[in-house]
Each structure stands twice: as structure tokens, then as C-alpha cells.
Image: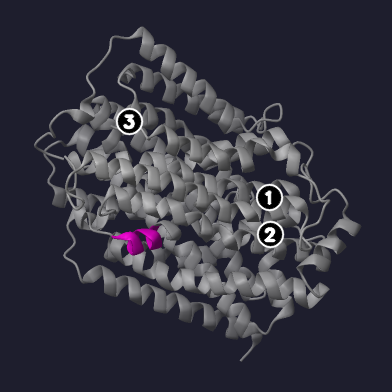
Amino acid sequence: MSASAMALTMIFGIVGVGTAIGFYAGTRHKMTLEQWTVGGRGFGVILIWLLMAGEIYTTFTFLGASGWAYSRGGPALYIMGYQPLAFLVSFYILPPVWEAGRKHRMQTQADFFRVRYGSKYLAALVALLGVICIVPYLQLQLTGLGIIVEVASFGAIGRTPAMLCAFTLVAAFVFFSGVRGVAWVSVLKDILLLFAALFVGIALPYIYFGGIGPMFTAVIRAHPSHLVMPGATKNLGHSWYISSVFMTAVGFFMWPQNFGASYTAKSGDTLRRNAVVMPLYSITMPLMLFVGLTALMVMPGLSNGDLSLLTLVRRTFSPWFLGVIGGAGALTAMVPSAILILTAATLFAKNICRDLFAPDMTDRGVALLARATVLVVTAAALVSAIHSSLSLVSLLLVGYAGVAQFFPGVVLGLFSKRVTRPGVFAGLATGFAVAVVLMLSQRDPFHGLNAGFLAFCINFMVTGIVSYCTPAEPYRLDEPAAGSA
Amino acid sequence: MRKPALGAALWGLIPFAGTCFSVSLWDRIEPRVLGLPLSFFWLISWLFLTPLCMWRAYRIEAKRDAGARPHPEGGGA
């Protein structure tokens, strides 16, 4: 067996086992809309942990973090900075979000806006913007899958056909198994990833330098400024770090899929306890950074930093082990993709199609439409993945700049009685517009600040000012729940 | 919805101060700790210190819950 055949067989074997687990777990429950989207609202600490971990350990963790350590250096520290803070923020906002969700039978993030601000148009706007932000995040996962197959086949299979076949599998998987299946595949994925990260993060510096400390000494000697911000970049300094960490920490649970995951919990307390322990899960991040730095010393000059981890593994270990790492990486792309597609499809079918155009559609109809949308969303991400060359981390930051704009509407919606519908409309629209304009005109970072952070501040101000200038509205979360969800 | 307790919110500010706003104090290589540059060591430490702070915050919130609700297993309103 040739080296690439061995590696690819290993990868497809692991993916096959993962898919089988998903199908099995998914088909054991009757698939109503409630079951497909929020797992019947019965997930305890363990399943929630798995689902949320499924959403943080993505291709971004695996390839993007090492890629940035390789190509940018110091600024990659922001990844270690924001993750614990994202869970910290969830400690305060998810339990009340959950409580409102249970009372008013919410299934999506847009449902929250519909109930709190009493407007299906605001909800549809939130759903639409959410789907738009999901596309680059999905594209990130796709690109990661493409990279894995490309490196494992030693270049024999191109990135585009690799992405095509991987995503057919993901779409089929989401179609049949729903959120419960996804949570169970996370078990396999997280065990593999944890093992892979611990192993390569410790073994690679050890093999080439005799340890992590000597590896750092070598990096410092060869590239004295690489490890301190702005590292190998010109404009990613301390103000960029603070604004990016802040924006991604508040933005993390504004991702429609992360926000929606809170509705699968059994109680608000589950979510709070989860928030306490989750930061420990980020322990793989420094290991990924170590791998990127080792790769910088061992094989400088790669055209794309995102290739560094896999290329170094391929160079160091035998092909079957490259297959294990690649398989772990493939599941790490597939599980979050499945969650993203599921969320986007539900938002589209429920909050846009039904609420705006076909109010008498049944839950069954919505479930069918959502499944059809799976294919549309997947295709959109596939097309943009084939035509884009942004690095994995940059793709993620684009999505974050968008979703962080939901934060004022959510937090003020929960804790302020004075915030109004026009205020949130205006703030959200302005924030999103500012983020899009700055990003598209290549002005990120803007005067050393993360563009999404700047948009977020403007959004908060506009929401506050417009709310004070418009008449007060009832606090709708305290009203009795409406008859239909 | 009920706002978080002041004490719980204050515990949450500590990790924010430690890892976000204070970056210019610890973004440096020397002194190396356990072979790691100071910045790496600092952020890795906070992966463990943050759960500690949040555990304190959790105790405060849990105590408040127990006071607000006579039946510990009751699901609230």
C-alpha cells in the first residue's frame, strides 16, 4: 500500500465510524422539529459539554491556531486569551436565555428577538444575518477538510474534489441525524483530538529540539521578535489584541449555533456549571501553538501557514499516523459543520420562510423545508470556499465581526427594561453595516483596533440613544407565553 | 430576567483584567517560566485560574438560588 493510500484509508475509516455513530444515535429518536433542533430540551451536563465542545474544537483549533503561530507569531496568543473569557461571558447570559427559551418555547436565536421585541421582521433580520455569518465559518471547515485530504494524499487529490465529497457526507449526516447524533459523534472526535493534540504538541518539539523549552529558545534566537506582538505582522499590536479578545469573547455565544445550543440544556444551572469548567478544555490551544512554532523552525517558507501542522506530521511520522491525525481533523471539521448547517437551515426555514411568507406552515413542513435548505447552505459555503484564499483565522474573524453585533440586542433585551425595538433595529443595522464596510474595504484592523469591535461599540451607542428617544415598550419576556411557538 | 449578583459579576472581572486589558504588562519573553516565554506561561495559567474565579461566582449564584426557591429541585416559574 502506498503512503497516501494508507493515510487516506485511515482517514476514511475514522470518518466512517463517526458517521455510523451519528446515524445510530440520530435514528433512535423520532424526529420532530423540536427533537431535530434542540434534542427535546433534555440534555444534561455531559451531552451539553459534548455539544459545546463540538462547537469550540473546530478545524480552526486544529489547523488555524498552528497556522497563525507559524505565520504571525505573537498575535496568535489572542486565541488562548479569548476562549476562557467566552465561557465566562456565557456564565452570565446563557441561564437567563435558557429560562426565556423554555418559557416561550424558543428554538433559535431569532425566536429570542421575536419574543423579546415582538417583531417577526426583526427576527427575520437576525436570522438572515446569522445565516450570512455562518457561511464563512462553514467555509473555514470546508477549507480545512480540503487541506487535510490534499496533504494526506501527498497532493494527488486536489482540494476542490476533496471538499466536494466531504461535504456530501456532512450534508447526508445532518439530514438524517439531527442535533442528538451530532452530540454523540463529538465523543469520538474529542477523544481523538485530545489525544492527537497532546501527542503532537509534546512529541514534535521533543523530537526536533529535545523539549518545549529548548524549542522556544531556538525560536527566540532565530526570530527575536516573532513571539511578542505584533510578531510577524505590522499592525496586530496590543490594541488589536484587546479589541479582538473582547469582541470574540462577547461574540462567541452570539453565534446562532452556540446561542441555540443553550436551549438543549436541562436547566439553567447546567449551563452555569458548564461555564465554570469549560475553560479547561482550551488546554489544547497552547499545544497547537507549540506545533506551529516547531514547524516554523523545521520547515520555514511554507506558502500557507494552515498547512504547517499536517505537513510537519507527514514529514515526521509514518503514513498511518498521518491518517489518524487527518481523521481526527476531518471529524473536527465535520461535527461543527453539521451543527452550523443545522442551525442555518432551521433559521432559514422557521424564522424567514414560515414567519414571513407562510404563517400556517406546520412544524412538519418546517422540518422538511429545513432539511431541503441543508443542501442550499452547504452549496453556498462550498462555492465560496472554492473561490477564496483567506486564512482560516481570518475567515473566523470575519464571522465574529458579524455575530458580535447581536450582543447589545441580547444583553439589553435580557437585563434592561428600557431598550426598544427601533433601538435594536437601528443598532444592529448600523453595527453590521460598519463591520461590512470596514472588512470589505480592507480596513481591518482600523487604526490598530479590530473592525468588528469598533462596529460593536457604535452598535451599542446607537441602540442606547435610539432606545432613549423612542417610547418605552413592555418587557415581553415576563408576559405569559403565547399559544404557539 | 434577574441580573447576576454583584459579587458574581466582580469575580468575572478578574479574568478579564488578567488576560485581556493587561496585555502590555505580560506580553514579553523574559522572564522565562518552565522554559515558556512569560506571555505563554501567563495565559496557560489563566486556563486554570479562570475556572477558580468562576467557581467562586457559581457559589454566590447558587446560594442566591437556594434563597429564592424553597424547593431545591423545583424548576422556577
* Amino acid type at image mark 1: Ala
Task: Report x, y in % for residue A231.
Answer: 79, 46
Task: Report x, y in % for residue B15.
Answer: 57, 43
Mark 3 — residue? A414
Residue drawn at (51%, 52%), measured in percent from left and top? B52
Q: Mark 3 lies on which chain?
A: A
**A49 versus A154 height, above or below:** above
Mark 1 — residue? A76
Q: Dot 1: what SS?
A: helix
**B51 versus A191 height, above or below:** above
**A426 versus A451 height, above or below:** above
* Amino acid type at image mark 2: Leu
Q: Do the residues labelled 1 and 2 touch (CB within 8 Å)?
A: yes
Q: Mark 2 lies on which chain?
A: A
Q: Main secondary structure of the magenta part?
A: helix
Query: Of callouts 1 and 2, which one flags the residue occurring earlier in the amino acid sequence?
Result: 1
- Residues packed near mark 2 inside 10 Å, few (<14), some (14 to 19) or many (20 plus): many
Residue drawn at (51%, 60%), measured in percent from left and top? A281
Which residues fall within the magenta stretch? Answer: A44-51
Q: Which residue lies furthest to the right in this view?
A: A221
